[in-house]
């Protein structure tokens, strides 16, 4: 049965994960699915991101997003790109943490009105940088602008297009390859 769970996960990348929906799809107990997800995380098959909620009213508190360490199984190009960015950000955050550069963490933002930003890097438990991953859309999302203004932190929109580096208001839109090269 855990094999069926592994087959279901690639289609849920980049979305808030509903353990209850997985439970229904697999026809097993809720705690069984949670246990399997924990096992897969310990085996480095997946990793999870928690929502950042400290300074946001009306934010989503419980649900997590999952990403796979081997993103080759993800069919949807946009989800695969988001997963690619997530894995690089996760490694950078862990490196900064290990080097003693601060208490870094990687999460995401989402409120009850469905505004969402793919990634929120926190430093010392405060938002430090917001990042949205888009295949080609060079116009920053409304949610990215909203949360950047609300939290008073810089924001990036990473795109797959080569040679992109521009500002759209307070948001920097930059090619993912150029920006990721700067990470540890």
Image (cartoon, rainbow, N blue to C red):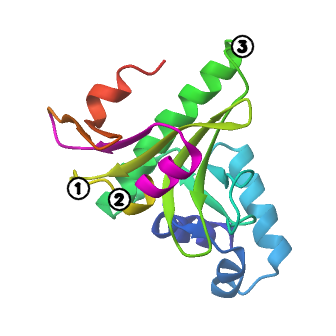
Q: Residue 137 carries which label?
A: 1
Front residue of 173/42: it is 173
Measuring from the top left, give residue 182's x and y in whole percent.
38, 19
Cα separation, mark 1 vs mark 2, equals 9 Å
Residue 26, given in percent of the width and then of the height, sits at 67, 82
The x and y percentages for residue 20 are 72, 81
| Residues under numbered marks 3 and 1 in contact, where contact means CB atoms less than 8 Å apart | no
Q: Report which quarter residue 122 is drawn in.
A: top right
In the rendered structure, which disc, 3 or 1, sits on the residue that comes first in sequence? 3
Q: How crowded is mark 2: few (under 14 residues within 10 Å), some or many (20 or more)?
A: some
Q: Does the residue at mark 1 contact the one at mark 2 (Cβ under 8 Å)?
A: yes
Residue 141 numbered mark, or none:
2
User: Left of 89 or right of it: where is 164?
Assistant: left
Residue lying at 47% horizontally and 34% vertically, measured from the top left: 88
- Residue 151 among those drawn in magenta: yes
The residue singled out by tag 3 in the image is 100
């Amino acid at each position: 049965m855990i094999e069926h769970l592994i087959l279901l996960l690639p289609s849920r990348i980049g979305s808030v994960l509903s353990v209850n929906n997985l439970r229904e799809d697999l026809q097993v107990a809720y705690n069984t699915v949670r246990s399997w997800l924990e096992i897969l995380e310990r085996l480095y098959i997946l990793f999870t991101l928690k929502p950042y909620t400290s300074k946001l009213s009306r934010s989503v508190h419980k649900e997590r997003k999952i990403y796979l360490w081997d993103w080759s199984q993800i069919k949807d190009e946009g989800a695969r790109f988001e997963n690619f960015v997530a894995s690089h950000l996760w490694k950078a955050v862990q490196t900064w943490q290990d080097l003693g550069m601060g208490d870094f963490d990687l999460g995401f933002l989402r409120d009850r009105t469905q505004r969402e930003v793919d990634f929120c890097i926190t430093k010392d438990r405060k938002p430090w940088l917001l990042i949205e991953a888009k295949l080609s859309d060079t116009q920053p999302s409304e949610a990215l602008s909203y949360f950047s203004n609300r939290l008073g932190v810089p924001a990036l929109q990473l795109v797959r297009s080569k040679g992109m580096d521009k500002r759209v208001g307070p948001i920097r839109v930059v090619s993912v390859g150029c920006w990721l090269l700067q990470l540890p």
